[in-house]
Image (tube, helix red, strand yellow):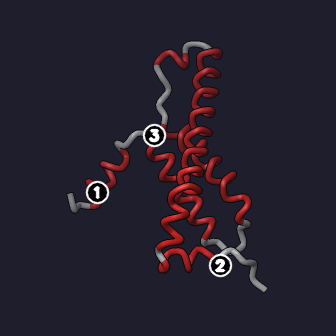
Amino acid sequence: MNDPIQMFLNLIQMQPCILSVCFALFIGYVLKLTPSYPNARIPVASIGASVVSYLILCVPPQNAHDSTLNLIRYLLATLIIGCMVGMFAWMFHAQLLKRIEEKLPFIGDKLKNNNTPPQ
């Protein structure tokens, strides 16, 4: 289990929802550590990253390519679910992870004032 390749293969085999939540949180923290990116736009970027990652990770069913209507239904359903997964990731961060960050000084101090524009 300590093998990095095996850990990567286990990560790939996870459900698309879990991977999309992890990717949205990862993008959010990367943007939070980027001083030039405004805080107010991070939730939108995280939700957008979740939608795109969910679209990429989901495999369409066999009948999705039979007709244009089936493909449109699949894409619309995937977009809606990806948006809901992104909203869940954002709410998970806002309600739980942010409170954990505040209690841990070595994490909270790095993230607190990092988003001020350079002068």
Label 2 with label 3: CB-CB less than 8 Å: no
Tag of residue 16: 3
* For residue 16, side relative to residue 112 (left or right): left
> Seen from this angle, which residue lies furthest right?
119
Q: Position of residue 45 (x, y in %)?
A: 66, 54
User: Circle 1 sits on which residue?
Assistant: 5
Q: Which quarter of the rendered picture does the N terminus lie within?
A: bottom left
Residue 10 vertical position relative to residue 30 in the rendered view, above or below:
above
Q: Is residue 73 above or below residue 41?
A: above
Q: Amino acid at mark 1?
A: Ile
- Counting residues from the start of the chain, the first of labels 1 and 3 encountered is 1
Q: Earlier in the sequence, mark 1 or mark 2?
A: 1
Q: Gap in Å between the C-alphas at discs 1 and 3?
A: 19 Å
Circle 3 packing at 10 Å, graded few (<14), some (14-19), many (20+), is many
Q: Pointer 2: what residue?
A: 113
SS under mark 1: helix
Q: CA distance from mark 2 to mark 3?
A: 33 Å
Amino acid at dot 3: Pro
Percent across and percent down for residue 87 are 60, 44
Judge from the rendering whether residue 53 lies leftward or rightward of residue 40; answer left or right.
Answer: left
Q: Is residue 46 left or right of residue 9?
A: right
Foreground disc of the pair 1, 3: 3
2 or 3: mark nearer the eye: 2
Q: Residue furthest left?
A: 1
